[in-house]
């Protein structure tokens, strides 16, 4: 049995707690021993009270501690742990492994997905990016990750930084373009609903085609007439600026004209 | 029985031909009478030869002619039709209804979706935006559209222009951001595969949440430290410019700082 404790109680922590509890229930060799939460109530709907603590000194010895706190709190929290030479992993895409305090063995356990508060998620298809400082710890991280996901990747801190930047493009920025699409619909009394099948299919397409192969539209086919008609149509200066820069980037394929 | 003919043989035309043939096979009141194609071979894998013509004069009388040609050919093709007072619809998102020649009654039959050459698509969930100049023609367009889709919308030319611009944002531009994500992965030897579940979930999220509610990430939470670390990490000037403008737009919610 591999014993794991989670330090943190936010949105992602709660999703991970639920995933480990589910793995435990179906009989995989994982045991969620404790959750550290400053406010006990934050996770009391998920766990028995005797498994929740708000005191670092009450943390039992386990095989792996997973820290799920905000990026800027990782260093502090890891340095407050009152034990040594145990395996402690953080879960952040943008923080290097060496930010963890050196009193313990360091690891990273980064599930690359966007988590919504009230939307349950199937962890089994979420890629988990693992990093450690030695092979034995990596094997342990792998065993733990395997109990909740089929998609494991060895990713070092530099690669993880790249992944996080790429994720900002394909998640945060993409979502913002959805918002602009919705704003344009609203301004013109068109239901945003009409665009939803297109949004889904656009994402679906790059599961099998490369984005470059999947690219269509006026910018791709250098259709200046349509591009100019669109720019004339768009009244919002910010939308216009974004239209121009992305059209330019598609037209020149990222190279300067 | 409603008799329909299609003028055009490109990618979207072929998807629509297949959809009508399927509707015909399952016994809905639609009959695909003819397809006009300059090159007979372009559609001979879909239809019997006696249903294909490359001669406008050979077009039989039907209830609805649907023109599926490139935007800049719509006016010309509609003016070459050798008959009068029949219902002729185009299928373009960015062309106004009045671009059609006035010898015939005008309509628009715009399926809002991205069509890939070799990827079959389920038409039933594709929104079809309809427009006509009189109520009787609208009813006919509706009847035809209903045989292949459950999602029909009355959209006038001005609204359709807005939809098309919005579609460029949520499809063309989103896909380009996928490409940038892939480029950043490639530059850093990270498999793009890792991002695919995130891409899917990002699209999935806005099926139920508004994009504004769904927005997360460093720009949204005004996390300047992460933003600056990302800008430092990105070496490509074009990627950097796009990162900056979209971050700015999220941070200020489209308003000037």
Image (cartoon, coloured by chain):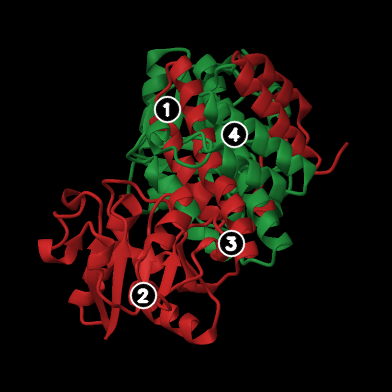
Chain colours: A green, B red
Q: Quick one: B114 or B215, which is closer to the camera?
A: B114
Q: CA distance from mark 4 to mark 3?
A: 20 Å
Q: Are marks 4 and 1 in contact (CB under 8 Å)?
A: no
Residue B189, horizontal then vertical, whole percent: 42, 16
Both labels 2 and 1 in a single chain? no
Q: State whether residue A60 is above or below residue A138.
A: below
**According to the image, label 4 marks what residue?**
A247
Q: CA distance from mark 2 to mark 3?
A: 21 Å
Q: Nearer the viewer, mark 2 or mark 3?
A: 2
Residue B70, horizontal then vertical, whole percent: 42, 49
Q: Do we see residue A23 in this rendering?
A: yes
What secondary structure is marked by label 3? Answer: helix
Q: CA distance from mark 2 to mark 1?
A: 63 Å
Q: State the residue at coordinates (43%, 78%).
A: B85
Mark 3 surroundings within 10 Å by alpha-carbon count, few (fewer than 14), some (14 through 19), many (20 or more): many
Going from N to C along the chain, the mark reached first, 2 or 3, is 2
Q: CA distance from mark 1 to mark 3?
A: 52 Å
**According to the image, label 3 marks what residue?**
B160
Q: CA distance from mark 4 to mark 2?
A: 36 Å
Q: Quick one: A232 or A235, which is closer to the camera?
A: A232
What number is the disc on residue B64? 2
In the rendered structure, the residue with mark 1 lies on which chain? A
**According to the image, label 1 marks what residue?**
A141
In the rendered structure, the residue with mark 2 lies on which chain? B
What secondary structure is marked by label 2? Answer: strand
Both labels 1 and 3 in a single chain? no
Residue B97, horizontal then vertical, whole percent: 55, 65
Q: Are marks 2 and 1 in contact (CB under 8 Å)?
A: no
Both labels 2 and 3 in a single chain? yes
In the rendered structure, the residue with mark 3 lies on which chain? B
Residue A103, horizontal then vertical, whole percent: 62, 14
């Amino acid at each position: 049995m591999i014993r794991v404790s989670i330090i943190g109680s936010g949105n992602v922590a709660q999703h991970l707690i639920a995933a480990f509890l589910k793995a435990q229930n179906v009989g995989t060799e994982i045991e969620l021993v404790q959750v550290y939460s400053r406010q006990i109530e934050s996770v009391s709907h998920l766990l028995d009270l005797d498994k929740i603590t708000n005191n670092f000194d009450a943390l039992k010895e386990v095989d792996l501690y997973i820290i799920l706190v905000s990026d800027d709190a990782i260093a502090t929290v890891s340095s407050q742990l009152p034990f040594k030479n145990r395996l402690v992993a953080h879960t952040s895409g943008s923080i290097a492994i060496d930010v963890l305090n050196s009193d313990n063995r360091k690891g990273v356990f980064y599930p690359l997905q966007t988590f919504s508060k009230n939307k349950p998620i199937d962890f089994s298809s979420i890629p988990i990016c693992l990093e450690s400082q030695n092979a034995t710890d990596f094997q342990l991280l792998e065993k733990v990750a395997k109990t909740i996901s089929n998609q494991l990747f060895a990713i070092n801190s530099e690669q993880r930084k790249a992944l996080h930047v790429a994720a900002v493009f394909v998640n945060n920025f993409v979502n913002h373009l959805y918002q602009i699409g919705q704003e344009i619909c609203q301004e013109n009394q068109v239901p945003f609903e009409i665009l939803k099948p297109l949004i889904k299919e656009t994402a679906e397409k790059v599961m099998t085609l490369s984005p470059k192969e999947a690219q269509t539209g006026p910018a791709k086919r250098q259709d200046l007439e349509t591009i100019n008609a669109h720019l004339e149509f768009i009244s919002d200066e910010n939308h216009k600026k974004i239209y121009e820069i992305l059209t330019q980037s598609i037209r020149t394929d990222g190279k300067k004209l």
